Image (cartoon, rainbow, N blue to C red):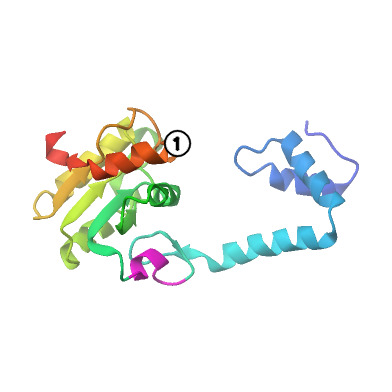
Amino acid sequence: MEQSYNSSLLDTAVAELAKLPGIGRKTALRLALHLLRQDEEVAHSLGSAIINMRDNISYCQRCHNISENDTCDICSDKRRDSSIICVVENVKDVLTVESSREFSGLYHVLGGLISPLDGIGPSDLEIDSLVNRVSSENISEVILALSPTIEGDTTNFYIFRKLSSTDVKITVLARGLSIGNELEYTDELTLGRSILNRIPFSAT
């Protein structure tokens, strides 16, 4: 039975905060009590920022990265190399690759990885839209920058098969990345070197 804090308003706030990933009820209570100790403007500003983010951030129609417009800032940046697409699992991986400062092309966010055990198949991901981009845009290379896990490798192979009839060069990150590690937790130096030293997928 969940603990009651003698205030239905506090109970509700704690319950909502505890829904966030990595936040248990004890941490949620600490956060709620912290906000109560602050000036009202602090809580109002936080609430407004969250609501504004949720209402106004959507996804880029081209690459599926987060965006405040139909096309994200990266896709709109004329200084980027639009002939190279880096395929990543999620938005966090875009931020991770960007932090390496070694990639200046565009991205394509799949929205997950193929995982039959979790009921996630190719049709649940943005794979068809990637194939369409390769066929409709002047793409010379597709970098498969997925985590070196079973699910990542399965997704890599599926995409490779889907693009095998095209002339596009398909590469993967150099295996300086540890097998089984999530891309998100890779240090920037290792990731940067893996991007620079990427290899043809067929060689794997």
Q: Secondary structure at mark 1?
A: helix
Would residue 119 be seen by someone viewing this image from the given angle? Answer: no
Magenta stretch contains residue 72 = yes
Magenta range is 69-77
Q: In this rendering, is residue 72 above or below 101?
A: below
| 77 sits left or right of 10 in the view | left
Q: Nearer the viewer, residue 43 or 150?
A: 43
Would residue 189 be seen by someone viewing this image from the given angle? Answer: yes
Query: Local crowd at mark 1 within 10 Å, few (<14), some, or many (≥20)?
Result: few
- Return the x and y of residue 40 as percentages of the image width and height: 84, 60
Q: At 80% from the left edge and 63% from the top edge, which residue is drawn? A: 41
Which part of the image, by quadrant, shows the N terminus? top right
Rendered image quadrant of residue 63: bottom left
Q: In this rendering, is residue 36 above or below 25?
A: below
What's the amino acid at mark 1?
Answer: Tyr
Which part of the image, by quadrant, shows the C terminus? top left
- Return the x and y of residue 163 as percentages of the image width and height: 15, 51
Magenta stretch contains residue 96 = no
| 199 sits left or right of 77 in the view | left
- Return the x and y of residue 120 as percentages of the image width and height: 36, 42
Q: At 71% from the left edge and 60% from the top edge, which residue is drawn? A: 47
The residue to which callout 1 is attached is: 185
Q: In this rendering, is residue 41 above or below 86?
A: below
Q: At 21% from the left edge and 57% from the top edge, which residue is drawn? A: 131
Q: At 39% from the left edge and 70% from the top edge, which residue is drawn? A: 71
- Return the x and y of residue 162 as percentages of the image width and height: 17, 49
Count every numbered label the image shows and give the total. 1
